[in-house]
Each structure stands twice: as C-alpha cells, then as structure tokens.
Amino acid sequence: MPTNCRRTNDPSVARVPVLTKEINLERRLRRHLRAGGYAVQKRIKAHGPDIVATKDSQTLYVETIGNQKPSGDPLTSSQKYTHFLRMLGQIVLRLNQPEYRGGNFAIGIPQDSYYCRKLELILPTFRKLRVKVYVCTRGHVNEL
C-alpha cells in the first residue's frame, strides 16, 4: 500500500531525506499539535511517551524517532532499523497497559525513504489500530 510518506503537495519542499535529530522532530511535532488545538504536556520523565497531548478530553501518546545522531551524522540503516522497531514496540506495549487505556497513539517520523518503506508495511495495521502517523518534512508535518 503506497503512502504519501515520500511525497508532499508543497513543491518548495526538497525530495531528499530530512536529516532530523529526534529531539528536533519532537519539538516540531509539539508545535504542530499545539497549532491543532492540543494542550501538550512538558516532558518531565525520561521514560514514557515522547509527547503527551490532550484535546477534547482525548489523550494522544506519541513516540518519535529521528534519522540523525546527536553528532549530526546520519544514522546507518541498521541503526534506523533498531530505532524503528523500538518505536513500534513502545506503541504496542502501551496499547494494553492500564495507564494508557482509552488513549490514542501516534508515531512521528522524519521524511526518510528507509522509514517510509517500513511504514508502508505497517500502515494497514496501524490504521486498524487507529494509530496516527505524522511525517515531518522541512517546515511541514503531514498526517497520513
């Protein structure tokens, strides 16, 4: 199932991977959620969801990943694989934990061909589970 992960409607956005550290992607997604009317909690724990946001009495738990090391170097394919699987595992584990029951879940990823190929494999399942997907491009956040 193809996604719009690798495309955007904005012609000014380059069709190359967006190198993004996870913390920067998280900040961009927090701004996007606030602009969409969410009340976004400050991150106070080292463990737990990267973002917790509330809108209309519904809580959204978001896991994010980047594709760039803190040093600025790009992640290798094996590092991306590990980060992607860890993010998926965190979502799946929380689906049945009592403290997250009744909540909604989402992932935030950078525009990156590796992540987009993996996303195409899991998107049908995420749609069944009602897990939202946000793809961050240069200056934009797209919900698939």
Image: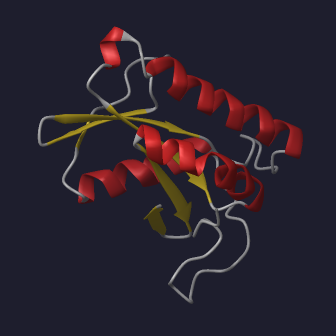
Tell which of 130 and 6 is nearer to you: 130
Counting from the top left corner in percent of width and height, residue 135 is at 53, 58
Colouring scheme, one of rainbow, by chain, secondary structure, one colour: secondary structure
Furthest residue to the bottom? 11
Counting the numbered discs, the total is 0
Which residue is drawn at the image coordinates 70% and 78% (left, top)?
15
Which residue is drawn at the image coordinates 48% and 51% (left, top)?
133
Furthest residue to the top? 98
Which residue is drawn at the image coordinates 45% and 20% (left, top)?
94
Counting from the top left corner in percent of width and height, residue 1 is at 64, 62
Residue 129 to residue 32: above or below: above
Residue 45 to residue 25: above or below: above
Horizontal side of 136 relative to 83 (left or right) equals left
Counting from the top left corner in percent of width and height, residue 96 is at 42, 15
Could you say which quadrant of the image residue 16 lies in?
Answer: bottom right
Does residue 35 appear in this view?
yes
Does residue 106 appear in this view?
no
Could you say which quadrant of the image residue 64 lies in?
Answer: top right
Furthest residue to the left? 56
Counting from the top left corner in percent of width and height, residue 116 is at 68, 58
Tell which of 139 and 116 is nearer to you: 116
